[in-house]
Amino acid sequence: MKGTRSLGQFLTVALALAPLASAWPEWLPDIDALVVRQNDGTTSEATPTATRVGDDATPTESDQPSSTDASKPATTNLNTGKVSTPTGNETTTRPTHSTFNAMDGAGGVAMITPARTAGTTLYRIGDPTPITWVWNYTSLQGTPTAIDVLVSCSTATETWTLTQNMTFEPTATFTWDTLKYSESAVASPLLVAQYTLLIYDSDSSVSATAEAGYLAPFSGFQFGLYTARPYQDLGEWKCATCSGAMGDVDRQALRFAISMSIITILSFTWYVTGFAALL
């Protein structure tokens, strides 16, 4: 009897709620508004919140734009470089300067072309054939970084730089085209005079003190430069020191000197002869 009564009560309640179920969409909210559905492949994360206290509050994580906010474009900081500050433990590597035995002496230059036994060498300024010098190094223990080549003239008290930072080789060869140099160096022309060849280490100077094992400044080769003159026929050529080239003034001076010499001799002879007659 009790089971039959419970079943009857359940059916009565179900019949009473049937009109309410049919009226759900009209007076209750949409079921999607009450139950949040999760899309496939995404995860929902809680956004951290923070409160702001006073005007000097520090921005919190909630103040920054969220990457999950689809209404605002996402920004990325591309400045990923870092500035490294050197510490006191870091050291800078510098080339070392070796010291050799002072008894070994300094390095030098030995001329090969021209040979030292050739005497004073003369070169013509503007010659189409360039000047060629060849030399090697002696007693070198420290290799020069590069070589500078210059020429100096004591007459003009001037120095001409022929090359700088020339590659070091055990046997060096340098060619100087005086024709091209004369055409380009109009403001500083070469003079007819005697010159001195200067060779030294590019890291040094022409007046540096010689150091054991290293190349000492070289100035042991001297040469002369001259200019060519145009051709002149022998018949038209006159010797400036010959008597045939003397002018009228020179001739008169010579005649006067000869006349005075004759007068002096005659006067002295007459004086001596007259003095002897009195005796």
Image: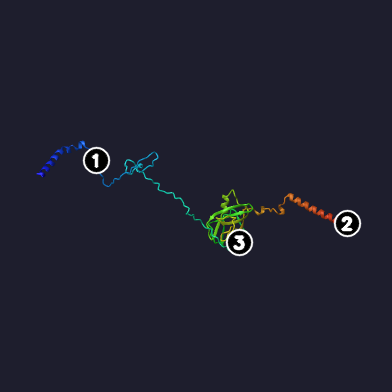
Q: Which amino acid does label 2 sit on?
A: Phe
Is residue 112 in view from this perspective?
Answer: no
* Image side of residue 72 versus residue 183, left or right: left
On screen, residue 246 above or below 59: below
- What is the crowding at mark 2: few (fewer than 14 residues within 10 Å), some, or many (at least 20)? few
Q: Name the residue under label 1.
A: 34
Q: Is residue 16 among the parts visible in the rendering?
A: yes
Given this view, does label 2 or label 3 mark the residue nearer the observer?
A: 3
Scheme by which the image is coloured = rainbow
Q: Earlier in the sequence, mark 1 or mark 2?
A: 1
Q: How far apart, in angstroms, are the residues tagged by discs 3 and 1?
A: 112 Å
Camera-side residue of 172 and 20 = 20
Quadrant in the picture for residue 209: bottom right
x and y, in percent, of residue 18 in the image: 15, 39
Q: What residue type is labelled 3?
A: Arg
Residue at label 3? 116
Of residues 53 and 115, the one nearer the viewer is 53
Q: Which of 53 and 196 is in front in this view?
A: 53
What secondary structure is marked by label 1? helix
Q: Residue at x 84, y 55 (%)?
A: 268
Mark 2 and mark 3 lie on one chain; the one further toward the N terminus is 3
Where does residue 254 sit, x and y in percent of width and height? 76, 52
Q: Quadrant of the N terminus?
A: top left
User: Mark 3 touching mark 1, by CB under 8 A?
Assistant: no
Residue furthest to the bottom: 103
- In terms of depth relative to the viewer, which is nearer, 218 or 100? 100
Circle 3 Cα neighbour tier, 10 Å, few/some/many (<14 / 14–19 / ≥20): some
